[in-house]
Image: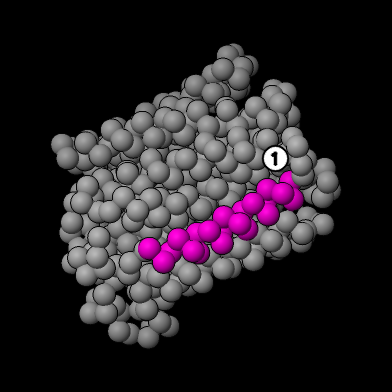
Amino acid sequence: MSEASLQTGGQPPSKVGIAFMLILGALMAFTSLSTDIYLPAMPTMAVDLQGNAELTITGFLIGFAIAQLVWGPISDSIGRRIPLLIGMVLFAIGSAGCAMSQTMGQIVFWRVFQALGACTGPMLARAMVRDLFTRTQSAQALSTLTVIMAIAPIVGPLLGGQIIKFSTWHSIFWLLGIIGVLMFLSLQWLPETLPQQRRNKASILSAFTNYYNLLKNKEFMRYTLCVTLYYISAYAFITGSPFVYINYFHVESQHYGWLFSVNIVGVMIVSLKNRKLVRHYSLDSLLKVTTAISMFAMLVLAVSVKTGVGGIYIIVATVFVFFSMNGIIAASATAAALDEAKEIAGSASALIGSLQYGSGIVSSLLLAVFQDGTPWPMASVMVVFTIASAAMVMVKRV
């Protein structure tokens, strides 16, 4: 597909080139890949580096959340490709720094640096979707991208588990560095989606006022908070599950990936279904149903963990239902929020991403503070914030 045709916007997702969608899917997978691939190694890292391994996730998410707020206005002013190219370079350097780290402080620092580049992937992929598509088409396209990006959370833990079995956790980060270089090379096939005439002509500094305007936009924030609160729950599982499954239930590290990956299969199936659902039902209706299902699943999880009934089987089953709903919640809430942002999609995508993925900071810190060696801290965080996410879509328009 030519760059000129892409810049016209409003084309159906099915008409966009396969290579284009594959690259965008890979860019959106950067966050998951950067964290999920070393989840099986976290207990080993905690011992080797004599520190709290959850802080490596916290550091990454801090850098990820803050950097997006800078890249968003920049991309609205100069386009999407240049920030992406710079981002891949930063990601590769940060990955190498992580691989060579010898202390917990060092790896947390390089995780922050790694995030400065990684954040450009999902943020600008979402912005490029908004550059091209309408509200409903954006939801379809984001659902398609979710299916593609879901490969990372499936392959990541499985691959990381095998690497830690035959090598050390350092090798995992060297692999991430190589992936960063390959993504940099693949960007030569990615066209610019924001033409000169649609770029923000104001200074980049003044463009930061867009965030203030977005924060005042009640509908934009309602959808954004829905997905943000949902992701606090999701990151509670991502951060806590290695210790729950491996340390508490004594699942072997190389098998942890299978238990983690089953959730992503649910995401892929529901994401494919969502491409059809958005043509027949409003985004608000879909969000109400899926957040309610997630809330019910987490209530069952909390009761099971508190009473000890069902053990690991109930955890696996309820978390599967919870994550499956992500196939609709993330795509629909993001598409609805971006539709409220109009011509500042880069800034809007940055704010959504900053809050969405920065929410993991809340999860990892809560688990680090309240960790008691049982699944209860993880379960309690998940149920509280899933209820809060559902409440956002129940709020009536004002």
Mark 1, Cα crowd under 10 Å, few <14 / some 14-19 / many 20+, is many
Q: Is residue 96 above or below residue 236?
A: below
Give the side of residue 114 with respect to residue 301, left or right: right
**Residue 2's spot in the image, x, y percent?**
24, 65
Identify the residue under disc 1.
Answer: 163
Residue 187 lies in magenta, yes or no? yes
Query: Foreground residue, 96 or 345?
Result: 96
Q: x%, y% of residue 312?
A: 60, 20
212 horizontally vs 97: left or right: left
Is 380 inside the magenta-drawn segment? no
Viewer-nearest residue: 131 or 53: 131
Which quadrant would residue 202 be assigned to in this image? bottom left
Q: x and y percent of residue 243 in the render?
A: 69, 34
Amino acid type indicated by mark 1: Ile
Secondary structure that dominates the magenta span: helix
Between 154 and 379, the residue placed more toward the observer is 154
Q: Secondary structure at mark 1?
A: helix
Which quarter shows the C terminus?
bottom left
> Which stretch is magenta?
169-189
